[in-house]
Image (cartoon, helix red, strand yellow):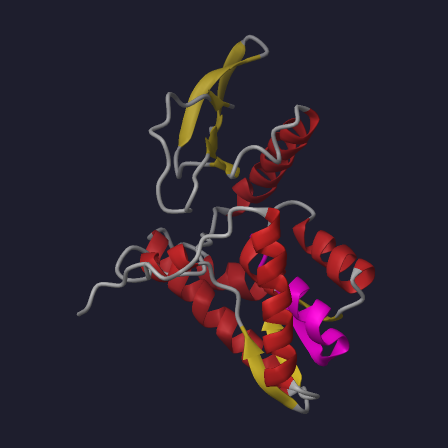
Amino acid sequence: MEKIVRPESMERITTPELAQKFIEEQVTEIRTQVGNKKVLLALSGGVDSSVVAALLIKAIGKQLVCVHVNHGLMRKGESEQVIEVFGKELDANLIYVDATDRFLDLLANVAEPEKKRKIIGGEFIKIFDEEAAKLEGIEFLAQGTIYPDILESDGVKAHHNVGGLPEDMQMELREADAILREEFDKNGLAGKVWQYFIAVPDFKSVGVRDGKRYEGWAAIIRAVNTTDAMRTPKPVGTIEFE
């Protein structure tokens, strides 16, 4: 099998001027290709699909139909943010599907990460297909994928990269992630760090709380910077909190 590599001819966007030039070019190309037809997009709320959604809204407005599926593993308030930004502020055609129970039922007792990804991907396609069948006049399907995802999918890991969690960890992880994001915002780090999140291992740790032995889930803070979404500097350390 031929190894997938990033094309040397793929220009990197490194300045606001290059970004604006890219947007203008893509808007023109989209309008030419789509004409007066409709486009369907799976909008997860992540950077990839959100950028494509914003670009398509700028190019064709209401001709775009976005489908947001809540699989129950979203960050705290993430689905609400998608509805607020795209459904209200950008006035997009947005279909919201709460499929939490469907996904969590399928992920119950599944521990292997790659198996989780494939279950999530397979069920997402089913739901997306169900919603698409309810619509009329759709002639284009839009997809947002950064190039590193294409490289990773070649034997590294399946995408979309989301994993299931034990039921009693759901709310704790969302709260911890929300706290981390709030602190990054407060200290002006949100726009300076490429990616930051809370990771929770699949085992509990023992510590002391209120002078007594305590057993609970450890919250591990991960924060990384990169210039191409493929390589990051070696981390200097890891801080763990319970």
Q: Is residue 84 above or below residue 227?
A: below
Q: Which residue does the image show at 33% across and 29% down from the upper left?
A: 234
**74 on left or right of 63:** left
The count of marks equals: 0
Could you tell me residue 46's position as x and y percent? 57, 55
Q: Is residue 210 magenta?
A: no
Residue lying at the far left of the rendered structure = 1
Residues 96 and 61: in front is: 61
What residue is rendered at 71% in x and 76% in y?
60
Residue placed farthest to the top in the image? 211
Q: Is residue 205 visible?
A: yes
Screen quadrant of the N terminus: bottom left
In percent of width and height, residue 85 lies at 75, 56
The region drawn magenta spans: 53-73
38 to the left or right of 109:
right
Residue 69 seen? no
Q: Nearer the viewer, residue 144 or 157?
A: 144
Question: Does residue 71 show up magenta in the picture?
Answer: yes
Q: Is residue 103 left or right of residue 135?
A: left
Residue 183, placed above or below residue 79: above
Q: Is residue 224 above or below residue 167?
A: above
Which quadrant holds residue 47? bottom right
